[in-house]
Image (cartoon, rainbow, N blue to C red):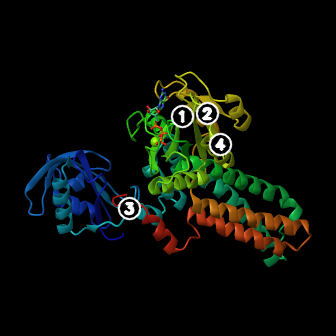
Amino acid sequence: MADLIAAPATHGGTAAISVVRLSGEGAIRAAEQVFRPNGKKPLSAYGDRKLILGTLLDAEGEALDVCLCTVSRGPGSYTGEDTAELQCHGSPVVVAEAMRALYAAGARQALPGEFTQRAFLNGRLDLSQAEAVIDLIESETAEAAKNAAGQLSGAVTRKVRDVLREMTAMAAHFHAAVDWPEEEIEPFELEGYADTLNGAASILRSLLDSFEAGRVLRRGVKCVLLGRPNAGKSSLLNALAGFERVIVTPEAGTTRDTVEESLRVGGVLLRLTDTAGVRETEQQAEKLGVRRALEAAAEADLVLAVFDGSEEMGAEDLQVLETAKQAEKTIALVNKCDLPGRIDEEKLCSVFKTVIRVSARTGEGLDTLKNAVAVMFPQGSNAPRGEILTNARQAQAVRRALEGILQAQEAARMGMTPDAVLVGLEEAMEELGRITGQTVSADVAEEIFRRFCVGK
Ligand SMILES: Nc1nc2c(ncn2[C@@H]2O[C@H](COP(=O)(O)OP(=O)(O)OP(=O)(O)O)[C@@H](O)[C@H]2O)c(=O)[nH]1
Ligand SMILES: [Mg+2]
């Protein structure tokens, strides 16, 4: 068993409860030194995963807290090692003292992700599942969390393993037929494996497709409010946020710089940027703001082009219109629909597929906007939860594996010898192994685990 590590697993501030975990050689002995059960039995006499009430002791052996402790012995624990968890009262001082007592009992501070790294090294999780743990911790929407939970229970891993098993069987057959010609092994015929290769390619392709769709789950939608001064961009951001996030005044040119806010709109995580109103100006700061607004629009997944519906269209609106047309996706918002309309809506409808009348003042139309966003950015893909690939490293490996298989198919089609076909196949196997971690180098694994927080 590896050396003894300890770390707080919960947030550093004041809380009702804080959890401190321990894992490695002597974990239960160390826990026994800092925790005295209320009953007569010593801690080591308790079974796994039982909650035991007792007293937490500081490094000097003085009573520090009334707390709960649970032990879980290897190999059936999270890390695969002997582990203990202390649930103490959530004062940062109690946690700091508990840590000091654990250092005195022989533990050292765990590195970020070290618990999960040990789970990986001990075969409790494969690498894609370990990465799902980070995704779960970092998830910002319920959908993202549910997908990560599916991955954690091995949904992606199972698909990859299925493909890997077929590829391995195919390669094994080839090698057996070549290495033991005198044995009665069925001759290796490439034609017999055409379906296997097709099936593998189609599974990998669907995983890759899910990655594209999963981008929304992973990092949300970059969305920019663009419009001329006073169109009501900042008012709309506030209305969507539900609080006064940005300054609104009747003066044109209120917003000078880009302002970002993350919001859930129609279940989608919008990384919404409010911008300076687009117009010609001599003001240095505003000029730079306008430039930033146009740059932000160029990089956005979605541009919300805001027009003041109570005014006729001017030259500035036309510039907004031209910029918004270039965006990947655009929704035109005709704001101030609580006032008499004077804008040429027909013109807008001829340019934009989606035109919605809204009022930042009354909230009218905002539900329609939310629905439009939800339809434009479906959460993930048709893939079941957990089978949406969200990790760029894994997607890269799937892409290369697919290339390997396509190369093998091409070689087979051109009538090349089986060993030429095997080259592509073995490349694919190597790449698939990277996803589960079988063929990943120690350095890469190390880097992945350092992305975790301490205590996980
Ligand atoms: N009647 C009405 N007034 C609105 C509405 N939305 C915004 N306004 C008013 O329009 C003015 C400008 O609103 P802002 O939200 O500051 O406009 P902006 O597009 O952010 O303007 P800049 O920051 O100058 O580019 C303010 O006086 C708002 O109260 C609306 O839906 N209806
Ligand atoms: Mg503004």
Instruction: Answer above or below: position of 38 versus 332.
Output: below
Mark 4 or mark 3: name the one nearer the start of the chain. Answer: 3
Instruction: Answer above or below: position of 443 versus 199.
Output: below
Q: CA distance from mark 2 to mark 4?
A: 23 Å
What's the residue type where badge 2 is placed? Ala
What's the residue type where badge 4 is placed? Leu
Q: Is residue 228 left or right of residue 49?
A: right
Residue 449 image offset from top left, x and y in percent? 44, 65
Q: Nearer the viewer, mark 3 or mark 1?
A: 1
What's the residue type where badge 3 is placed? Phe
Label 3 lies in ligand 2 vicinity (Cβ under 8 Å) = no
Residue 266: assigned label = 1
Q: Nearer the viewer, mark 2 or mark 4?
A: 4
Label 2 lies in ligand 1 vicinity (Cβ under 8 Å) = no
What residue would you read off at disc 3?
115
Q: CA distance from mark 2 to mark 3?
A: 43 Å
Residue 178 image offset from top left, x and y in percent? 82, 76
